[in-house]
Image (cartoon, helix red, strand yellow):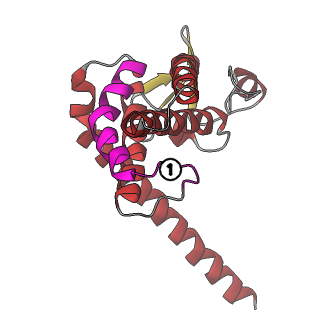
């Protein structure tokens, strides 16, 4: 990645050294079928997409920070707008880095539109916390309701522009959200079942 020495969580060298049941290979490279959508995604395409997104987001974030540094005391609404834009970009970049570096969970490997939905919902979750006074930001502007207003106005367009998605990308969000919720529920059920098995094993062993 550009901003940090972050390595790909699933590099090709990992697949050449051992057998990964979920990973296949053809003339296009190593790929897997996504857990959330059951769609074929090449690992190199997935990581290249994240790298491209990072480059765009960092450029925008640097521009926002430069404008913040030039703010005058009386520019409260502009301060709120820039803060909202910064939070969107920071949320996006954190998600990019988390997914890029994840080395255990194949669930992070997904299509660009599905990844976009994940980020969209993370921004919306932050917006909800902020609107309820539950955000733990140390540098929140004095008039936080302006930040909420500008988040509502610009977060979708900001993400669409960086991802270079058409407008209809987020109109499909309900499909991706439902898939992700089902996947999360399945993982929870598996975890619960494993815990029950472990307790059973312990009871027999005692």
Look at the image and say whether residue 75 sits in the magenta stretch: no
Q: Residue furthest top?
A: 27
Look at the image and say whether residue 151 sits in the magenta stretch: yes
For the point 49% across and 34% down, which residue is it?
86
Please tell me whether the stretch drawn in magenta is mainly helix, strand or loop.
helix
Residue nearer the viewer, 175 or 51: 51
Q: Would you identify the image quadrant in which residue 131 lies? A: bottom left
- Residue 179 visible from this viewpoint: no
For the point 59% across and 74% down, which residue is it?
195
Magenta segment: 137-162
- Give coordinates of residue 107: x percent, y percent: 51, 42
Residue nearer the viewer, 177 or 121: 121
For the N terminus, the image quarter is top right
Helix, strand or loop at disc 1? Answer: loop
Asked if residue 1 is positioned above or below residue 205 in the image, the reply reads above
Quickly name the residue at label 1: 140
For the point 68% across and 39% down, which residue is it?
103
- Give coordinates of residue 17: x percent, y percent: 78, 27
Q: Residue furthest bottom?
A: 206
Q: Is residue 28 left or right of residue 204?
A: left
- Residue 82 visible from this viewpoint: yes
Asked if residue 18 is positioned above or below residue 149 in the image, the reply reads above
Q: Is residue 189 left or right of residue 16?
A: left
Asked if residue 132 is positioned above or below residue 90 in the image, the reply reads below
Asked if residue 183 is positioned above or below residue 57 in the image, the reply reads below
- Give coordinates of residue 7: x percent, y percent: 73, 28
């Amino acid at each position: 990645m550009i901003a940090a020495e972050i390595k790909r969580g699933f590099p090709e060298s990992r697949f050449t050294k051992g057998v990964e049941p979920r990973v296949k290979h053809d003339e296009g490279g190593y790929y897997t079928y996504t857990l959330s959508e059951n769609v074929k995604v090449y690992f190199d395409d997935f990581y290249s997409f994240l790298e491209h997104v990072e480059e765009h987001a960092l450029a925008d974030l640097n521009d926002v920070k430069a404008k913040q540094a030039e703010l005058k005391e009386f520019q409260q609404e502009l301060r709120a707008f820039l803060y909202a834009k910064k939070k969107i970009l920071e949320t996006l970049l954190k998600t990019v880095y988390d997914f890029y570096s994840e080395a255990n969970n194949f669930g992070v490997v997904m299509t660009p539109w599905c990844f976009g939905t994940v980020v969209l919902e993370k921004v919306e979750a932050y917006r909800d916390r902020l609107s309820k006074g539950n955000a733990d930001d140390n540098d929140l502007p004095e008039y936080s309701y302006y930040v909420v207003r500008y988040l509502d106005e610009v977060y979708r367009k900001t993400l669409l522009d960086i991802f270079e998605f058409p407008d209809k990308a987020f109109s499909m969000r309900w499909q991706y959200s439902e898939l992700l919720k089902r996947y999360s529920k399945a993982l929870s059920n598996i975890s619960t079942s494993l815990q029950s098995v472990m307790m059973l094993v312990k009871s027999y062993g005692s």
